[in-house]
Image (cartoon, coloured by chain):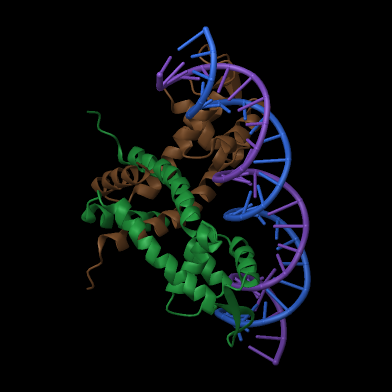
Chain colours: A green, B brown, C purple, D blue
Amino acid sequence: MIIQPKHEIFTLVVLEVFKVVGQLNIDGDNMSREFNLTASRWKVLGTIGLSKQLLTVSEISRHVGQSRQAVQRLVDIMLDDGLLIMEENPNHKRAKYIKLTKLGQKIHERLYVKQIDWAKKYSADIDKKNLERTLEVLKQISR
Amino acid sequence: MIIQPKHEIFTLVVLEVFKVVGQLNIDGDNMSREFNLTASRWKVLGTIGLSKQLLTVSEISRHVGQSRQAVQRLVDIMLDDGLLIMEENPNHKRAKYIKLTKLGQKIHERLYVKQIDWAKKYSADIDKKNLERTLEVLKQISR
DNA sequence: GCCATATTGACAACATAGTGTCAAATATAC
DNA sequence: GTATATTTGACACTATGTTGTCAATATGGC
């Protein structure tokens, strides 16, 4: 058994993150397809739906770790599709708040329920404590 | 302290994976820029460079967890750029082996060294045992 | 209040990634 | 061996994501 230096394990973790994110996106696309959504749009929907406060596009982008412009594009489409609606932001004339419409809320809730079954299925064989440690490590990496 | 069910932690891990992959791609782009590469192309270069056997495009795509077509596109560009070269595959007339050229090897080696410093820096504050557990969990997820 | 700096939305250009489709090559079942 | 299914490269199309730029808006130092 070769002892690997920590940085090599870190590198393997990075490569595995790249690999896993592809499959997660495919699963996300599949789960959200029946609502005419994609994994990316679902991320936006979920971020808004789970937030305790009103969010602007810039704030959403920081939550999901993507560029402001990428999120703006998705939001524009979802506004068009009637999933999202803008609300005046008293603190900023241009940066409006983005909220879920009734339809957006409904889909968010149904996807939330659907996603739980998926998460249960795929986490079944994973040790809970290790899952918690994984979350901590990933948070440390994204700092 | 609220006790979270395992599937909820799993969901948080998934969201953190999405978040972290954005930053990793940015770092990959920055590190490989001096060699006229991007994170995506580096992944292809690294996969070939680290493999113990000759690989076809399809095999590379399975390694990195991306579609055959996406990898094919990158390989075509890198063949053009003189980083890669094709070799006849005696087992398959169409599916040629993709190898690194001298230039490709050189850049692969230099990026490998550069990447070690990066990995050391970002893994400095992370517990090694937890990093190993994270790798295991991610492998379980990508199954 | 005034000015330099940062944030934000809007738009454009380009890179990357998935899906669908087709024909060629290979593998498998019988 | 032959028919069928799978794999593969090639190509087109669409979705996603980053970077760069600009003007409008906030923010902070003074």
Quadrant assignment for the C terminus of chain B:
top left
Residue A83 appears at what percent x and percent y?
Answer: 57, 72
Residue B70 appears at what percent x and percent y?
Answer: 58, 38
Looking at the picture, does residue B34 appear above or below residue A78?
above
Left or right side of B75 for A124: left
User: Can residue B141 be seen?
Assistant: yes
* Nearer the observer, C26 or C9: C26
Left or right side of A47 for B137: left
User: Can residue B53 be seen?
Assistant: no
Q: Residue at x 46, y 70 (%)?
A: A108
Q: Residue at x 27, y 54 (%)?
A: A131
What is the number of callouts on the image?
0
* Nearer the observer, B115 or B26: B26
Residue B124 appears at what percent x and percent y?
Answer: 33, 49
Looking at the picture, does residue B133 appear above or below residue A100?
above
Looking at the picture, does residue B44 appear above or below residue A111?
above
Quadrant assignment for the N terminus of chain B:
bottom left
Q: Residue at x 55, y 78 (%)?
A: A101
* Nearer the observer, B39 or A41: A41
Quadrant hosting residue A89: bottom right
* Nearer the observer, C21 or A48: C21
Residue A90 appears at what percent x and percent y?
Answer: 59, 88
